């Protein structure tokens, strides 16, 4: 499977086209829109979330509630477009209109793509860069991920994201009774955290950052249950599934680190406290006594829950802007201010869910006969049984 996205932050719409879905998979717009609504929630979001009420329209690839096997087209309209038609219009400007079209940006914001993107593509108006590099693009990445999550759910695979840390405040509760329990608790939490006491401290810190015109980051985790063993490959570097997931998580705006299982803690432990001992039972087949490696060995799934963490830096758009340099005058200035969030970590956990789900679904579709959903389901069930009987 593959997909491309198109659109700017304040353009008329965001678009994605997904290719490679099996035919005959049940899919409705609400499967996608529920996830888009989740992305817009979360303590610390800015005014943009009050303007945009994202909903996706399926414009191709589905008929009567089932995929056709042809490319799936999704469109999310920007409700704020009416205020940006002159600034972001498609048609060429007429003579003398340049002064009418304001909001030109010549002061790059530290931590953003503004300056380097302008240098790369030769833009003198840095709005050309920030409009595309904006995290607004994750809207359609969540839409594509929602389609992947639907496919996985139908195959008995659950994907849930939650927040482990915000601004140095860590959740002390990391265990859960069931994947449904994890989902219910985090969906009810404004910061998508299992630990209620830590969640309140996180919200207080977000309020403090907002009052100071600052921003804070954190750590999210995605947990996947039900994934069959043997998905991915050890035979070549670009077929390792954990490597693909790491790339996907790192591609999320403002993410700067990825861990599986114990992650960087492994560097401080002996091998006897890192590797997962193997057991076998007639009921379960092969299993691991622990899950320190986060569900992967040799670039392949082990059948244990997948646990992947991502580190999100503080959002670089600040209401107390950092020092920068005007690209026209070369004089020092405070960087431009755009609408922003004081903390987007809770929303980022939803984006992380989406990109992880996409890589898992893509690997399954690549590895098995996937032209028809029923046949794909049969092959997955056969894989599970064969792994158990090996």
Image (cartoon, rainbow, N blue to C red):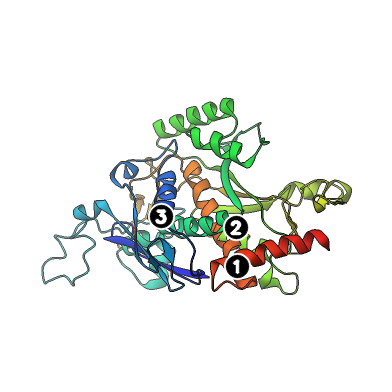
Query: Is 18 or 193 nearer to us in this picture?
Result: 18
Residue tagged 3: 139
For marks 1 and 2, give the CA distance.
Answer: 9 Å
Q: Secondary structure at mark 1?
A: helix
Q: Quarter-wise, where is residue 296 in the image?
A: bottom right
- Residue 12 lies, in percent from the top left, at 26, 60
Residue beneath disc 2: 155
- Where residue 354 is drawn, which disc sits there? none
User: CB under 8 Å between callouts 1 and 2?
Assistant: yes
The picture places residue 243, in percent across and down from the top left corner, at: 66, 63
Please determine whether, in this image, residue 200 is positioned above or below residue 148: above
Task: Please state which of residues 349 and 316 is positioned toward the viewer in this rendering.
Answer: 349
The vertical placement of 193 against 312, above or below, is above
In the displayed structure, 43 sits above or below 25; it is above
Report helix, strand or loop for mark 3: helix
Q: Residues within 10 Å of mark 3 (few under 14, many from 20)?
A: many
Q: Is residue 118 visible?
A: yes
For the residue pair 98 and 236, the one nearer the viewer reads as 236
The residue depicted at 52 percent of the width and 42 percent of the height is: 217
Circle 1 residue: 376
Q: Earlier in the sequence, mark 1 or mark 2?
A: 2
For image coordinates 73% across by 64% down, the residue present is 230
């Amino acid at each position: 499977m593959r997909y491309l996205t198109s659109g700017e932050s304040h353009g008329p719409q965001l678009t994605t086209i997904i290719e490679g879905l099996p035919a005959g998979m049940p899919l409705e717009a609400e499967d996608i829109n529920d996830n888009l609504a989740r992305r817009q929630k979360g303590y610390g979001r800015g005014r943009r979330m009050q303007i945009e009420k994202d909903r996706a329209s399926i414009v191709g690839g589905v008929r009567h509630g089932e995929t056709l096997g042809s490319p799936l087209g999704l469109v999310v309209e920007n409700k704020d477009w009416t205020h940006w038609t002159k600034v972001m219009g498609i048609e060429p400007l007429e003579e003398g209109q340049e002064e009418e079209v304001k909001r030109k940006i010549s002061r790059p914001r530290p931590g953003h793509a503004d300056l380097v993107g302008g240098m790369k593509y030769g833009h003198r108006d840095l709005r050309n860069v920030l409009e595309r590099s904006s995290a607004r693009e994750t809207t359609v990445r969540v839409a594509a991920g929602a389609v992947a999550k639907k496919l996985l759910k139908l195959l008995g695979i659950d994907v849930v994201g939650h927040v482990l840390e915000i601004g140095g405040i860590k959740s002390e509760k990391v265990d859960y009774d069931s994947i449904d329990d994890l989902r219910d608790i985090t969906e009810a939490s404004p910061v998508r955290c299992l630990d209620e006491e830590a969640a309140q401290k996180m919200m207080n810190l977000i309020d403090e950052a907002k009052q100071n015109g600052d921003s804070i980051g954190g750590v999210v985790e995605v947990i996947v249950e039900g994934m069959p063993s043997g998905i991915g490959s050890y035979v070549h570097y670009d077929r390792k599934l954990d490597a693909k997931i790491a790339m996907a998580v790192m591609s999320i705006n403002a993410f700067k680190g990825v861990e599986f299982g114990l992650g960087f803690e492994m560097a401080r432990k002996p091998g006897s406290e890192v590797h997962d001992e193997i057991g076998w039972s007639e009921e379960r087949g092969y299993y691991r006594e622990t899950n320190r490696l986060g569900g992967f060995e040799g670039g392949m799934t082990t059948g244990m829950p997948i646990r992947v963490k991502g580190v999100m830096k503080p959002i670089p758009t600040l209401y107390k802007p950092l020092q920068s340099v005007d690209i026209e005058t070369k004089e020092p200035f405070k960087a431009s201010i755009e609408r922003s969030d004081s903390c987007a970590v809770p929303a980022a956990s939803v984006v992380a869910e989406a990109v992880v789900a996409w890589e898992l679904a893509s690997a399954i579709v690549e590895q098995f006969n996937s032209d028809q959903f029923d046949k794909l389901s049969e092959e997955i069930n056969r894989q599970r049984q064969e792994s158990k009987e090996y």
